[in-house]
Every structure is written in structure tokens, then in C-alpha cells.
Amino acid sequence: TSATAPRRIQALPDALISQIAAGEVVERPASVVRELVDNALDAGATQITVRLLAGGVRSIVVEDDGSGIPADQLVLAVQRHATSKIASLDDLEAVGTMGFRGEALAAIASIADLSLASRTADAAHASRLDARSGELQPAARATGTSVEVRELFFATPARRKFLKTDATELAHCLEAVRRHALVRPEVGFAVWHEGKLVAQWRRATGGGPSQAAAQRIADVLGADFITQSLPVDLHLGPVHVHGRVGLPDAARSRPDQQYAYVNGRFVRDRVITHGARAAYDDVLHGNRQPSWVLFVTIDPLRVDVNVHPTKIEVRFRDGREVHQAVRHAVEEALAPSRAPAVAAALQ
Ligand code: ADP
Ligand code: MG
């Protein structure tokens, strides 16, 4: 017969498990930037600085002024399935932080050189952990955390080969920071590449939250975006939709300015995209792509964020209620622009 002898089943070594997990979470330097900025935001940072070398392939440093990590927990921070953010299934279902899987730092450390320098407010000094050697040493820095990731994919050359030019990787890193910056106007962001400041979005001071949000959108997407868009703000059932939607005339050839968020998390979601797109049906023709920045807020119990390793996809308990809310919100916002379009059609 041609049956082969069964091969032995073996438990995988920890390091390999982490490398496999890293394959899901870390596609390119921008994935690391996203995870590290998520962590900084979860730590309550008000200023986040990203420093990159060679598009992030050689080095990514993310510095924050958040709560810091106690020295005796640094080793845990880079361990798989270790997190300070949830402790039970109830916590998971109501999760309000960006992270909760306790996997990012462990995954990154398995495919790059990672070191973590951190200081809590009550510590006499900062401490630095080198994840590879496990060496823990005193360090100097103010309250907060710096994570340094060097030589991404050094151990997985197949992955490394898929990387594009430094300029392309830098563009992806910038986009990752932009997605965070749009939704967190109360936090300042700066991105440096090869020692040069390439993007800076200052934290809002003074003014109300909606003024801060508008200012941040203008800073990130340009003042033109504001003049060529309309405000959105609608509560429908348990769903609140706010943000800005581009005028039909300002539609683009590519959907590269469509930012959707659910409870503060950037998502790619067909329900939201379809709902928003449907609101443009009678004012936009051909393949033109509208721009939007849409913040959907909903009871965390009505959305499952634990469906994708990078959490970029979510699952709504009731997709229809979200679709309707988004569609109505965008339709209502576009009403002033619709009137002239209808008039023109009747001429
Ligand atoms: P998760 O974010 O899912 O908890 P991570 O691997 O990203 O998992 O981080 C593990 C833990 O390390 C976090 O739960 C947090 O306690 C700590 N941590 C990571 N980055 C920071 C940071 N910038 N500031 C404070 N704590 C951090
Ligand atoms: Mg995290």
C-alpha cells in the first residue's frame, strides 16, 4: 500500500509558536508601528514619537509619556499571552483598550531585536530589558516607555524579501500613525525618518472636543479636506455616527481617504463602507470614490473585536443597525450637496 507511517505529533517550541503568531500580526514595519502606538495609547500617553531608520526595517523606536511598566513586569510584557488589559471573558467582551491579546511584543521579539525601556511615576529610575538576552539594566528616561525594534525579519528572510523600498515602507508607517492620529486629537504625534521630522500633529489645546477633532482632521488630511467635506452627526438606535464626509465633487479615483473607526479603533468593515457608499448612490457616478472619516460608537457588547489577529476587522451583533445608522448619517450630511445635484439633473 502507499499509506505512509504516521508522523509523530510534537508540541512546538515556544519561540516557533511566537514566530507563527508573528506571521499573522506583523506583515511589515507598519504593523509594528501600529502595535506599539496602540500600546502607547493604552498607557495613556499624551505624546508619542516614532523614529524610523530605512522605512522601519532597520529600526523602529516608539517613545511615549504614558504610565510606564514596573521594572519587575518588563519580562512579563514580552511574554506570550501576558497582558494587563483583560483578566476574564467578561473583560474581553467589554474591552475598551486597543490591545488585549498579550501577543504583540512577544511576536515582534520573536522576529526582531526588541528592547524595552520604561519608568513608572514612582520609580527611582528607568529600567531596560533586552528581550533576546533577558538582560535587565537601569536606564535613564522620564516616566513612560520606549520600545526599540531592530532588524525586523532578520530570522525570517522569506518575509524580508516581501518588503518594498524604504520609501514605500515609510509611507505605510506614516499611514499607520495617521490612522491613530485622526481619532486621538488629544494626543500629539511626531514621526522621524533617518533623523528628519517627516510628520507632526500637535495635541489639541483649548477648544472643545469637536473643535479639536476638526482641527486634527485638517492637520492630518489637509485644510482642503475640511472645505470639501460636510460634518456628520447622527444617533440612530444604539449607534452614534460622527465625523466628516467628502463632497461628491471631491471624490477620488481611489478609496484612499476612507477612514472608519469603531469605538476608537480603525477598522476595515464592509458594513460601514457599504452603508456610507450607498448614501452617495444618487450623487456619485462611475467608479469615483468618496472620502470620509467616520467614527462609529456603539455599546462594546454589540461588537466583537476579537475576530482578527490585527483587530482590523470586527463583527457587529446586528450589522443592519450599523448599516442603517451609517447610511442615514451620511445621507443627512450630504443633503445640502444633494439639492443642487437634483436641480442639475432636472435641467
Ligand atoms: P497587549 O497590548 O495585548 O496587552 P502587548 O504584547 O502589546 O499585549 O503588551 C503586553 C503588555 O505590556 C501590555 O498589556 C502592557 O501592560 C505592557 N505594555 C506594552 N507597551 C506598553 C507601553 N508603551 N506602556 C505601558 N505598558 C506597556
Ligand atoms: Mg498591544
Image (cartoon, rainbow, N blue to C red):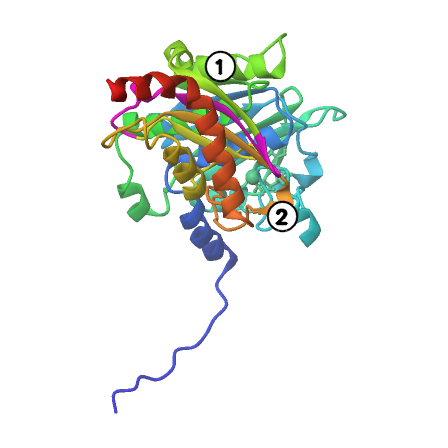
From which residue to which does the magenta span run?
235-254
* Magenta highlight on residue 163: no
Relative to 173, is 11 above or below?
below
Residue, far right: 122
Is residue 242 visible to us here? yes
Q: Position of residue 104 (x, y in %)?
A: 52, 43
Secondary structure under badge 2?
Answer: loop
Residue 106 image point, x, y percent: 53, 46
Q: Residue at x 63, y 29 (%)?
A: 118
Quadrant occupied by the C terminus? top left
Q: Is residue 250 visible?
A: no
Asked if disc 2 is less than 8 Å from ligand 1, the answer is yes
Q: Sort mark 2 into few (<14), some (14-19) or many (20+) by Cα contacts within 10 Å.
A: some
Amino acid type at mark 1: Trp
- In the rendered image, which residue does mark 1 sit on? 201
Of 245 and 159, which appears nearest the observer? 245
Task: Say few, some or many: other residues with alpha carbon within 10 Å of mark 1 (under 14 / 14 to 19 / 20 or more).
Answer: many
Q: Which residue is mark 2?
A: 82
Residue at 52% from the left image edge and 57% from the top image edge: 14
- Look at the numbered disc 1 and say if its residue's Cβ is closer than 8 Å to ligand 1: no
Q: Amino acid at mark 2?
A: Ala
Q: Residue furthest front?
A: 346
| Disc 1 element | strand
Which callout, 2 or 1, points at the residue further toward the start of the chain?
2
